[in-house]
Image: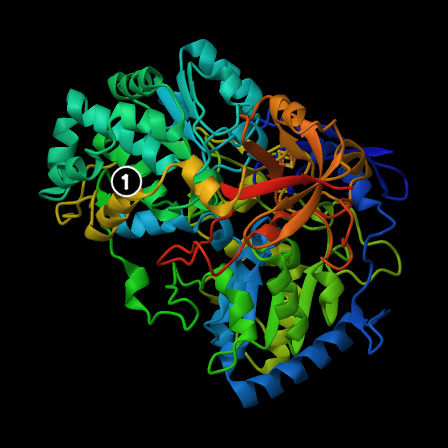
């Protein structure tokens, strides 16, 4: 037996682990690393049971190819690459490069080498058909940056704040909000509360974070814009905004326009519309605005709700009008140490509306955000004939068949492809539709560093960690690195790849460690230095926010015309009860995260299956009593788009009239037919053609009107 240190890569938290391996290098135990200076001995359920994933008999140990009868047979991975490259050549010759689409899933985000290799392959291939998970649940945040602007030095960090406001985010469960309780969340929050941090939580469910809050507002689902407009209105009417900050950094006339936009949202109106107490709303506005530091953070809730882009714009406006950003001279404690040093300026990154600079998509006129097409349009890009039709999809570590809205359409689209290639460790729902499935290495089989996104550190300290490959591939296995699939294809297609700015040798494959070295070239802390600390290290580095550059003229655009028009539209929309009655519905479905899984991953853990055998529909006990339903009884949930079976569970953390379920659950629709196990994928209830946001084609994925009937 031996023990080795590493870190978990089942989500972005990168919790430190101590692995116990037997003499055959079999992983027999995972325990938290008490010495890890970032996670401090924290490990969630998923990380603790990673040995089950590692040793699962269901795991793919070699590449498989779908045969004519639908069965899968083993194929050598090099042979598979040859065949796929041949098919790609033919598709490109006949239909052009955009017929090849790439999708970056969660596994790719959590694998440093794959994270870089996929966009490099895209660039070399020259396809515009590039998608990722980012536009399933978070694209409204990008839209907000593009229309409002952003602050170059970031928001007030939690650890230096007097107050924090959480809107539709629950980091104690989600674990994935950059810089916000990313690691060791419970102890960190308790410590910050003991220090005196004030906390406001706004969530349709009395979340785990709400238990720590000074003020908790529980609005009806889908009322984010209403509640935040109400907060802004109170702050402005009381004169609590940071007048010096807005005078310097908000576009001329912006504050007047903002007031006009929110004027309708009086406390009384917001209270009636959102179902909250007007006095609580006032107290929340006062606590936030009268604190000297502390920002608002949102999660996927407002980004998946109706008026997603508006919600995120208004939420960030709260930070702008209260000036809740790091200012010049403040020390930066979360330096991304594995990137080159870059100065951080206290200035506005101006709104550029980049989405309007590319031709709108042929599907619902969607724009592009930061070089990516909108994922909700991908099934239609596959199904719709014409120029640019997608005929081949590489699914790099995602699970579109489970995670995309409108599961029926998605599955139909995936089945219609000329070529579907999936990179996965298990035969998940998407893999079961694929022509080829590459068996990729699991976390402890690959060298790695923690996740970075948009040159930003996810972690609240100047910390990082390196892990070598710890578990060698089992004898006889044909496991591949995610990045290798794309290097291997590029080689066969005669493409020159550049990793970062360094051209790669296209004759001899690099090693993962060599790629990591290239990735970290010129970094603040050399990778070789970091390797000396097996549990990672917080480096005591001094960097301070710089004053604005003389040429910086950017201003926040707090209320551009399109945002203004949408907020007026919200003010004219009927209240919830009227909407439900008009459609013949009785409840709203609120979608949430659960600790047991991370999107659709971790479902392979038997202990997870035992804890959460199905995606139950949590309902308030009063609702269950009114419908004469007992715990675990089966119901049918209907939306205007579709229906799913589900088991009910009593849960008084949600309001009567609301049903709460998690997303990405279950198998393929035909596999789950007529059963609540393992079915109940809420994406069957979601349309990609109704309730679609402009710009990012984001669809309504929560706050969905539904009805519930007992299943006989
Ligand atoms: S899944 Fe995330 S929170 Fe859980 S142990 Fe792994 S890294 Fe930590």
* Element type at mark 1: helix
Q: Is residue 457 at all visible to an observer of this figure?
A: no
Question: Where's ligand 1: which quadrant?
Answer: top right
- The residue at which mark 1 appears reads as 571
Q: Quadrant of residue 608?
A: top right
Residue 351 rendering spot, x and y as whole percentages: 24, 51
Q: Residue at x 51, y 72 (%)?
A: 381
Q: Is mark 1 within 8 Å of ligand 1?
A: no
Q: Residue 239, located in which quarter of the rendered image?
A: top left
Whole-percent x, y for residue 31 in the image = 74, 28
Residue 335: x %, y % from top left: 41, 37
Quarter of the image for the N terminus: give it.
top right
Left/right of residue 204 with respect to residue 673 in the rendered view: left
Question: Quarter of the image holding residue 336?
Answer: top left
Q: Residue at x 63, y 39 (%)?
A: 708
Observer able to see residue 24: yes
Query: What residue is shown at x 61% (from left), y 26% (from top)?
Result: 623
Q: Is the residue marked by circle 1 packed among few (<14), some (14-19), or many (20+) residues within 10 Å? A: some
Q: Quadrant for the C terminus, please.
A: top right
Colour scheme employed for the rendering of this structure: rainbow
In this rendering, the count of numbered labels is 1
Q: Is residue 70 above or below residue 282?
A: below
Q: Position of residue 465 (x, y in %)?
A: 58, 38
Is 692 located above or below residue 309 in the figure?
below
């Amino acid at each position: 037996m031996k023990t080795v240190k590493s870190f978990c890569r089942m989500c972005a938290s990168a919790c430190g682990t101590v692995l116990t391996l037997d003499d055959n290098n079999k992983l027999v135990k995972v325990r938290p690393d008490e010495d890890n200076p970032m996670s401090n001995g924290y490990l969630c359920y998923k990380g603790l049971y990673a040995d089950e994933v590692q040793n699962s008999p269901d795991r793919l140990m070699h590449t498989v190819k779908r045969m004519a009868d639908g069965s899968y047979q083993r194929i050598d991975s090099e042979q598979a690459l040859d065949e796929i490259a041949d098919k790609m050549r033919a598709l490109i010759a006949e239909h052009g490069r955009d017929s090849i689409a790439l999708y970056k899933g969660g596994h790719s985000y959590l694998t440093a080498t794959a994270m870089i290799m996929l966009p490099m392959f895209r660039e070399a291939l020259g396809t515009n058909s590039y998608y990722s998970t980012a536009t399933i649940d978070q694209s409204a945040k990008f839209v907000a940056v593009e229309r409002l602007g952003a602050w170059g030095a970031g928001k007030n960090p939690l650890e230096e704040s007097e107050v924090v406001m959480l809107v539709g985010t629950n980091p104690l469960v989600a674990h994935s909000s950059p810089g916000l309780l990313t690691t060791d969340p419970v102890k960190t929050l308790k410590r910050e509360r003991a220090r005196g941090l004030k906390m406001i939580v706004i969530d349709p469910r009395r979340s785990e974070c709400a238990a720590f809050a000074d003020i908790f507002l529980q609005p009806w689902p889908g009322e984010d814009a209403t509640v935040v407009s109400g907060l802004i209105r109170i702050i402005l009417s009381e004169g609590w905004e940071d007048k010096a900050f807005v005078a310097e950094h908000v576009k001329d006339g912006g504050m007047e326009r903002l007031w006009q936009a929110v004027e309708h949202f009086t406390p009384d109106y917001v209270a009636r519309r959102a179902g909250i107490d007007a006095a609580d709303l006032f107290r929340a506005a006062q606590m936030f605005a009268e604190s000297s530091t502390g920002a608002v953070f949102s999660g996927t809730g407002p980004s998946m709700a109706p008026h997603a882009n508006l919600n995120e714009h208004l939420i960030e406006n709260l930070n702008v009008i209260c000036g809740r950003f790091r200012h010049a001279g403040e020390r930066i404690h979360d330096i991304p140490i594995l990137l080159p040093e870059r100065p951080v300026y206290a200035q506005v990154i101006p709104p550029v509306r980049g989405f309007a600079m590319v031709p709108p998509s042929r599907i619902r006129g969607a724009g592009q955000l930061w070089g990516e097409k909108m994922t909700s349009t991908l099934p239609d890009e596959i199904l719709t004939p014409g120029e640019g039709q997608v005929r081949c999809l590489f699914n790099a570590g995602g699970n579109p068949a489970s995670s995309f809205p409108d599961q029926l359409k998605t599955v139909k689209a995936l089945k219609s492809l000329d070529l579907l290639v999936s990179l996965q460790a298990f035969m998940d729902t998407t893999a079961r539709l694929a022509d080829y499935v590459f068996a990729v290495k699991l976390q402890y089989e690959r060298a790695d560093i923690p996740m970075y996104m948009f040159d930003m550190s996810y972690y609240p300290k100047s910390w990082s960690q390196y892990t070598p490959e710890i578990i060698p591939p089992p004898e006889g296995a044909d496991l591949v690195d995610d990045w290798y699939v794309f290097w291997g294809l590029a080689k066969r297609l005669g493409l020159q790849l550049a990793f970062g700015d360094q051209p790669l040798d296209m004759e001899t494959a690099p090693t993962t460690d060599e790629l990591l070295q290239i990735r970290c070239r010129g970094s603040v802390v050399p990778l070789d230095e970091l390797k000396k600390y097996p549990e990672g290290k917080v480096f005591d580095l001094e960097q301070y926010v710089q004053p604005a550059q003389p040429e910086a003229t950017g201003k926040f655009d707090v209320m551009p015309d399109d945002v203004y028009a949408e907020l007026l539209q919200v003010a004219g929309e009927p209240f919830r009860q009227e909407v439900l009655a008009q459609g013949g519905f009785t409840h709203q479905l609120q979608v949430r995260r659960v600790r047991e899984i991370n999107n659709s991953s971790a479902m392979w853990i038997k202990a997870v299956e035992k804890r959460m055998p199905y995606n139950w529909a949590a309902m308030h006990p009063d609702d269950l009593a009114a419908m004469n339903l007992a715990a675990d009884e089966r119901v049918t949930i209907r939306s205007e788009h579709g229906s799913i079976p589900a088991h009910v569970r009593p849960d008084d953390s949600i309001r009567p009239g609301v049903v709460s379920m998690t997303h990405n659950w279950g198998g393929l629709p035909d596999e789950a037919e007529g059963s609540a196990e393992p079915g109940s994928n809420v994406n069957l209830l979601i349309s990609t053609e109704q309730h679609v946001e402009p710009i990012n084609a984001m669809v309504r994925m929560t706050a969905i009107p539904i009805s519930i009937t007992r299943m006989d």
